[in-house]
Amino acid sequence: MDDRYPSTDEAQAVHLDADYPDAARDLNRWMPLVKWFLAIPHYFVLVFLWIAAFFVVIIAWFAIVFTGRYPRGMFDFVEGVLRWSVRVTAYAIVLYTDDYPPFSLDA
């Protein structure tokens, strides 16, 4: 993650790289029928994490206004929630992978 102002005519500083899966070899053809069901515990936890992230962002805004710095712990928490959401989306909605996402804010 990067907080520099994005350029409109140059390459962006943040990239999401993912190798395209070989559907015949890497993906189980029956998993899409149950992935949405297996992801329900993640959705339940993510609802509470997003609520917490909302309040953390508000508190971080005040910290940034008064100190000029984004507190590292708050930044790591919000970034972890975003990562977790992307992993669950890749698993259950985009059907990019059959690897069950971990219950973790870490990469």
Image (spheres, rainbow, N blue to C red):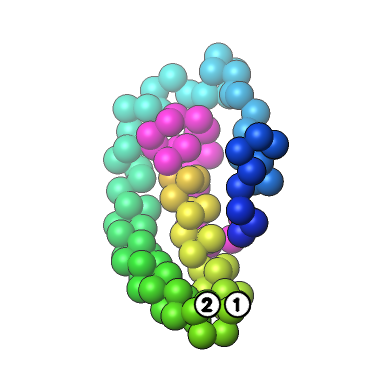
| Depicted 94 relative to depicted 49: above or below | above
- Give whichever of 100, 47 is nearer the camera: 47
Which quadrant, please, contains the N terminus? bottom right
User: Tags 1 and 2 in contact by the CB under 8 Å rule?
Assistant: yes
- Give whichever of 70, 16 is nearer the camera: 70
Q: Residues within 10 Å of mark 2 (few under 14, many from 20)?
A: few
Which quadrant, please, contains the C terminus? bottom right
Please name the residue that numbered disc 2 is placed on.
64
> Mark 2 is on which residue type?
Ile
| Depicted 8 relative to depicted 58: above or below | above
Please name the residue that numbered disc 1 is placed on.
69
Mark 1 and mark 2 lie on one chain; the one further toward the N terminus is 2
Q: Quadrant of residue 55?
A: bottom left
Q: Residue furthest bottom?
A: 66
Q: Which residue is depicted at the point 33% across and 33% down?
A: 34
- Give whichever of 86, 55 is nearer the camera: 55
Q: Quadrant of residue 53?
A: bottom left
Q: In the structure shown, which secondary structural element does the residue marked by tag 1 occupy?
A: loop
> Mark 1 is on which residue type?
Arg
Total marks shown come to 2
Q: Position of residue 101 (x, y in %)?
A: 49, 47
Q: Let me know if residue 18 appears in the view.
A: yes
- The image's mark for residue 29 is none
Q: Position of residue 43 (x, y in %)?
A: 32, 52
Q: Which residue is depicted at the point 65% across and 28% down?
A: 19
User: What type of secondary structure mainly makes up the magenta span?
Assistant: loop
Q: Let me know if residue 15 appears in the view.
A: no
Part of the protein shown in magenta = 89-107
Q: Is residue 84 left or right of residue 49?
A: right
Q: Position of residue 32 (x, y in %)?
A: 37, 27
Q: Position of residue 12 (x, y in %)?
A: 66, 41
Q: Residues within 10 Å of mark 1 (few under 14, many from 20)?
A: few
